[in-house]
Image (cartoon, rainbow, N blue to C red):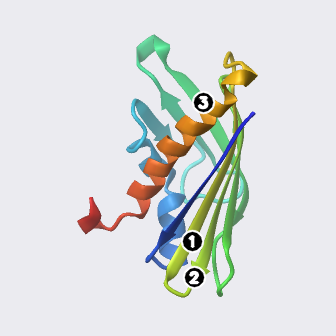
């Protein structure tokens, strides 16, 4: 299983950083050839299912994920979102924590990922690619409009 961790500090308050990093449909705008739908509807909460469809035409696959823990930040405590990946191609877990800081927020994203047909010796490459891709997603989601 490929495991990677990404951390970002943002001047955004924790509630706004949380809102942005849990806006699942906006994630798709940052990942090439990917569209995200939320068949269970919005707003997100425990039990929300969203699906990332990646690829072109018949070469696309679905990556369904379910929110199994949903605790938004409030009253100075961290927000915690846990996801289970339940697809036929991509399996694993993700954790997104948003911690309030004196100057904004600290976002920690940890992913445990297995891609069918990728041998275990490919895990370090998969983790490196995941760090780059999801790091870019976090950077874009947390950017101020003037930063883009």
Q: Position of residue 27 (x, y in %)?
A: 46, 47
Q: Position of residue 80 (x, y in %)?
A: 69, 65
Circle 2 packing at 10 Å, graded few (<14), some (14-19), many (20+), is some
Mark positioned earlier in the residue sequence (2 or 3)? 2
Q: Position of residue 11 (x, y in %)?
A: 43, 77
Q: CA distance from mark 1 to mark 2?
A: 7 Å
Mark positioned earlier in the residue sequence (1 or 2)? 2
Q: Which residue is mark 2?
A: 101
Q: Position of residue 73 (x, y in %)?
A: 63, 76
Determine if residue 38 is in view: no
Q: Residue furthest top?
A: 58
Residue 123, placed above or below residue 84: above
Residue 18, placed above or below residue 102: above
Mark number for residue 106? Answer: 1
Circle 1 packing at 10 Å, graded few (<14), some (14-19), many (20+), is many
Q: CB under 8 Å between callouts 2 and 3?
A: no
What residue appears at the point 54 percent right and 55 percent down from the top-left corner? 42
What residue appears at the point 55 percent right and 50 percent down from the top-left corner? 41
Determine if residue 125 is in view: yes
Q: CB under 8 Å between callouts 1 and 2?
A: yes
Of marks 3 and 1, the one in the foreground: 3
Considering the image in quadrants, where does the N terminus appear?
Answer: top right
Q: CA distance from mark 2 to mark 3?
A: 33 Å
Identify the secondary structure beneath mark 2.
Answer: strand
Report the front residue among 87 and 131.
Answer: 131
Q: CA distance from mark 3 to mark 1?
A: 26 Å
What residue appears at the point 38 percent right and 44 percent down from the top-left corner? 29
Of marks 2 and 3, the one in the foreground: 3
Identify the secondary structure beneath mark 3.
Answer: helix
Mark number for residue 125? Answer: 3
Identify the secondary structure beneath mark 1.
Answer: strand
């Amino acid at each position: 299983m490929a495991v990677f961790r990404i951390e970002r500090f943002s001047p955004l308050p924790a509630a706004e950083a949380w809102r942005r990093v849990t806006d699942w449909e906006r994630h798709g705008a940052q990942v090439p050839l990917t569209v995200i739908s939320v068949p269970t509807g919005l707003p997100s909460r425990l039990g929300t299912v969203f699906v990332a469809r990646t690829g072109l035409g018949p070469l696309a696959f679905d990556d369904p994920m379910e929110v199994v823990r949903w605790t938004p930040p409030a009253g100075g405590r961290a927000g915690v979102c846990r996801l289970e990946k339940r697809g036929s191609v991509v399996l694993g877990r993700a954790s997104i924590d948003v911690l309030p800081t004196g100057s904004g927020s600290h976002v920690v994203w940890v992913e445990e990922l297995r891609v069918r047909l990728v041998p275990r010796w490919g895990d370090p490459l998969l983790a490196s690619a995941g760090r780059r891709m999801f790091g870019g997603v976090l950077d874009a989601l947390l950017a101020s409009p003037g930063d883009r």
